[in-house]
Structures are given as C-alpha cells and as structure tokens.
Image (cartoon, rainbow, N blue to C red):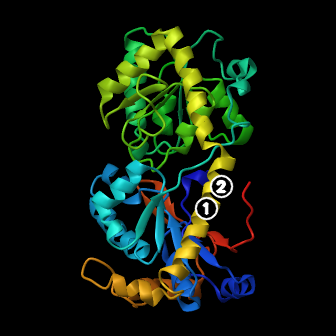
Amino acid sequence: MHEDDVYELGFSISDSVKSQLDDFEPSLIHISVPDCAALALVQYARDCEIPLMGTHHSNLPEYMNHYPGARWVGHLIAHFLRHNFNFLQVLYATTPYMRQYLIDTHKLDRVTELRVWGRGIDLDRFSPKKRSDKFREKLGIDPDDVVICFVGRLVAEKRPDIVANIIKRFHAENVPFHALIVGAGPAENEMKKLPNTTCAGWLDGDDLATAYASSDIYLFPSSVETFGNATLEAAASGLPLVVDLGCSGHLVKDGVNGYGCGSDDLDAYYQATLTLLTDDEKRAEFSLQSRQMSQQYENRKVMSQMVANYSHVYDEFYSKYGGHHRNRDKQYANKDSFLAGTYPKPIALALIEFFSYEIGKLLTVSFNGIPKVPRYNPTSDISVVAKYGRYEQP
C-alpha cells in the first residue's frame, strides 16, 4: 500500500504536544485537517487566546457520492466539518470556485470569513525540460506516440472509468495513441487490461516530473478536486489539459491551453482529447500556454501570500475581537451557527478520543477496499503552528 492511498487522521493531541506548544508560544494556529485532533487544537487555541485559521484541502463529503449507499456518510462528514470550521476566524479555500461551493453547499460564510489562497508549484522540478526519450523507451512507448497521461489515485471519485472508456473507444476506432497511467488503487487491475496502456504505479519527485514532461496530453476527469495539484504539475510540465471545467476551471482556459468539460460528460472528454491527439500544431501551442499559465503559481509567490494571510488573521484577532475568542462568539450566537462558548468537541468524539488514547490500538477503517482512517497520530493535523514574526517574505 502506498502512503498516498491512506488518509491519516488524529484523535487528540497528547500532553507532550501541548507542552511543546506551550514552549513554542505560537502566535497563530493553522488547522489543515479538520478532524478530532484539530478540535483539540481549537480548544487549546481558545484556552490560550491564540488566533485560529484553517485551509480547506479535500472535498470529503463529495467523495461519498461516488460509492453506492454512502451518501449518508457524506452528510455526517459535512456536519462534522461545518462544526469544526465554524470555530475558525478565517478559512482559506483553494479557488474562487471552491469558496462559492463552500458557501452554496455548507453555508460556511455565516460564521467564518472565507478567503482564497491557492497552491504553489516548483517550476524547476516540473518543467518541459524534463522530457526524456529514455523514459519513454523504458516503458515501451515509441518516440512518435502521442501519450495521454493520467496521474492520481485510481478510485471512483477520480473517474478512471471515463479515462478507460475513452481509451477503449480510441482503440476501437483505430485512433493512434498511447496512455500512461500513474497511480494506484482499486481500479488499477482494470486499467492494466486496457489496450495501448502503460500503468507505471506510483511515481514521485523527479520520476513523476519526467512522466509528465514525457507525455503529450493530460486527461483528468475528476470533479472533486479542491485545487488540482496534479493538474498544475501537468500544466507546468507543458501539457495541454482536458479537465473538469468546474473544479479545474482556474487552471484551464478553454481553447487556449486545453479544454474544460462538464462533469461526467463523456462525449466532451472524448472529443477534446481526440482534437489534441490529431492536431499537432494545436497541441504544441496549448503546451506553451499551459507552461505560461503555471508561472503565476510559482512557489515563492504563493508563500508570500501565506505570510500576508497570517498577518491578516493575527492583526484582525486583536483589532476586531480584542484578543478574545468570546468576543467573536457573541457575533455568531444564533441558530445558524455554533453555540457560542461551547466546548468544540462533541461528547461522542471526546469518548472516541479517550478510548483510542487509552487503548492505544491502531484504528483502520476501509470503505470499498479503500483505506480511509489509519492509526492514531496526535500531531498529524498541525499543518502550521505559526510563530508570528518568525517568517520573512521571500
């Protein structure tokens, strides 16, 4: 099992972690994974009057819609996430599209300020310069083959079924192509059976960068991405994009560096990919445009935005709320939000934390063969505990 197949969730923070936090004296706490450990951090921040912010990374409730009979699980997750996020002063969505989604679907703007903060890319690592004929030869890909690339977990919500359907259709219609599948998951065995297809398994680092750059088209029909890190990596590597117009619309300009397709629109994905397969000039032009588009997400630019975000949250906590969470609570003590001043962790979750901590066992939950919740890890959710003033703008 690859580490990317597993979601690590914490159930609490230990006394040792609290002691380390006390010694560090953070001026701001940034929640990255909204689980039980995050709620414990929320309580710590409230007790110590430390500003709280968070970033939204995974659209977990939407994932459940892709598994038969699991929609109700998505509703439970959504309620839990809303409970968690309501205690944050600011929540940063990854794109304007996701910010609006969180408003329309979860009404998060009623309590928490929603802002946008994107993701960055290492433009030296992910570059068209990484293209390698030796890499293609090693995988049995001919020099003249036009390679369709998919990178991601091979699970239902990433829609490998659409990719497989398109591959089968091209093969039946004698359209020349080669498909490169990078990733693993429950659908891997089925993908290995596809014609003209190479499954490389999981790749990372320079190997992954080489795989992108040695391909020619990026096909990724997932509609549950909160940002699309893999899509940005593909664009930085100079690949024309065929992606979901909704969640990936910020990375693709239709007819400029690729094509945006409607969710589940198999024909649109097929036609867009076929156009790029058969038009060398358009593919070359889109490649240049993808690389150019990706430059706005260069890591240093995004890190500068992060420093500005921390400054905003820190300053607002004192200027607007007087350095006290209870002052913020008073503004939101209504039926549409959390009950002001209540302990952030529901009793049921506190019991889970107690028993998991005392028993000390490894907890694993599987759904449809996909590992979802592994071991107790008290520190896995501290994305950043920011010491204000310690960071310098790059």
Residue farthest left in this picture: 335
Q: Dot 2 lies on which element? A: helix
Quarter-of-image position of residue 83: bottom left
Give the image location of residue 165, x and y in percent: 37, 26
Direction from residue 268 to residue 249 in the image, left or right: right
Direction from residue 274 to residue 231 in the image, left or right: right
Quarter-of-image position of residue 113: bottom left
Q: Residue at x 35, y 19 (%)?
A: 271
Q: Residue at x 75, y 62 (%)?
A: 392
Kind of residue at badge 2:
Ser
Direction from residue 88 to residue 359 in the image, left or right: right
Tell me, for residue 304, which label it has, or none: 2
Tell me, for residue 235, which label it has, or none: none
Kind of residue at badge 1:
Ala
> Does residue 172 lie above or below 390 as drawn?
above
Q: Nearer the viewer, residue 231 or 102?
A: 102
Q: Residue at x 49, y 25 (%)?
A: 257
Give the image location of residue 7, x and y in percent: 54, 61
Within-10-Å neighbours for mark 1: few <14, some 14–19, many 20+: few
Residue 362 can be seen, yes or no: no
- The reply to whether callout 2 and callout 1 are in contact (CB within 8 Å) is yes
Give the image location of residue 162, x and y in percent: 37, 32
Q: Give the residue pinned by disc 1.
A: 308
Count of numbered tags: 2
> Does residue 77 lie above or below 149 as drawn?
below
Give the image location of residue 212, x and y in percent: 62, 30
Q: How far separated are the C-alphas under marks 2 and 1? A: 6 Å
Within-10-Å neighbours for mark 2: few <14, some 14–19, many 20+: some
Q: Residue at x 57, y 49 (%)?
A: 119
Q: Give the quarter of the figure containing the C terminus.
A: bottom right
Residue 390 can be seen, yes or no: yes
